[in-house]
């Protein structure tokens, strides 16, 4: 690192802050970026600056948006009485790719994790409860991840929703379409059995 000019070292350190990027990966990205024609490198830098300065959180659902209210929340075609609570904007995008959900969303900003010092006040749970009370939400789909933190978050929120008379549901879990039973783990198989439906 001592042989690099200081701006290169600073660039490498910034890339190292990205999740899953170590020293070598950060160096590869930095040197690749510097190998581009100058106008492409500057276009990359401008895109990062524009995103950092022009993107904010939707005042309704906490999703990323360039406006105060995101396009999903402002769409008249969406059912505002049905809210799907997800951990991240990436989770929202995954559900949207399916094309079948016509409700709205709420970005929690993560999941409860005492080990990582993430408690209820660190998530957008209060905003969700306020929204439920003020907007007449009838059902909240708790689409958190199927891990310990996601399950704990879903259970915690469902207990808060119950006194409000709001239906709290969880995404179905089990076997993926096209999979073989012999390759499924025992937890997935049990969830599939527990969530069985009548034909």
Image: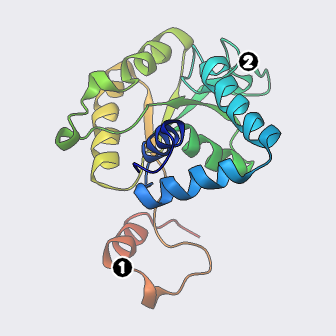
Q: Is residue 116 left or right of residue 93?
A: left
Q: Nearer the viewer, residue 91 or 18?
A: 18
Residue at far left of view: 115
Residue 194 in the image, given as x and y percentages of width and height: 37, 66
Looking at the image, which residue is at 68% across and 33% down? 45
Location of residue 24 by image quarter: bottom left
Image colouring: rainbow
Name the residue that disc number 2 marks.
74
Q: Is residue 103 left or right of residue 168?
A: right
Looking at the image, which residue is at 32% across and 48% down? 151
Can see residue 15? yes
Name the residue that disc number 1 marks.
185
Q: Is residue 22 above or below residue 93?
A: below
Residue 39 in the image, given as x and y percentages of width and height: 82, 38
Q: CA distance from mark 1 to mark 2?
A: 41 Å
Residue 18 in the image, given as x and y percentages of width and height: 47, 45
Q: Is residue 65 above or below residue 130?
A: below
Q: Is residue 129 above or below residue 114?
A: above
Disc 2: CA contacts within 10 A as few (<14), some (14-19) or many (>=20) = few
Q: Nearer the viewer, residue 153 or 166?
A: 153
Residue at far front of view: 3
Residue 1 in the image, given as x and y percentages of width and height: 41, 51
Q: Is residue 7 left or right of residue 158?
A: right
């Amino acid at each position: 690192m001592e042989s690099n000019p200081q701006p290169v070292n600073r660039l490498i350190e910034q890339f190292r802050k990205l999740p899953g990027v170590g020293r070598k990966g950060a160096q590869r990205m930095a040197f690749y970026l510097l190998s581009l024609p100058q106008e492409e490198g500057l276009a990359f830098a401008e895109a990062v600056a524009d995103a950092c300065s022009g993107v904010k959180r939707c005042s309704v659902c906490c999703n990323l948006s360039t406006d105060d209210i995101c396009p999903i929340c402002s769409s008249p075609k969406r059912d505002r009485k049905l809210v799907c609570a997800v951990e991240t904007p990436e989770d929202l995008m995954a559900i949207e790719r399916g094309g079948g959900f016509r409700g709205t969303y709420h970005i929690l900003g993560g999941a409860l994790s005492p080990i990582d010092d993430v408690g209820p006040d660190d998530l957008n749970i209060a905003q969700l409860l306020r929204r439920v009370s003020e907007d007449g939400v009838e059902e909240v789909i708790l689409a958190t991840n199927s891990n310990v933190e996601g399950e704990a978050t879903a259970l915690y929120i469902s207990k808060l929703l119950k006194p409000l008379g709001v239906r709290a549901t969880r995404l179905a879990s089990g076997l993926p379409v096209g999979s073989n039973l012999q390759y499924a783990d025992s937890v997935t198989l049990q969830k599939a059995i527990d969530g069985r439906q009548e034909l």
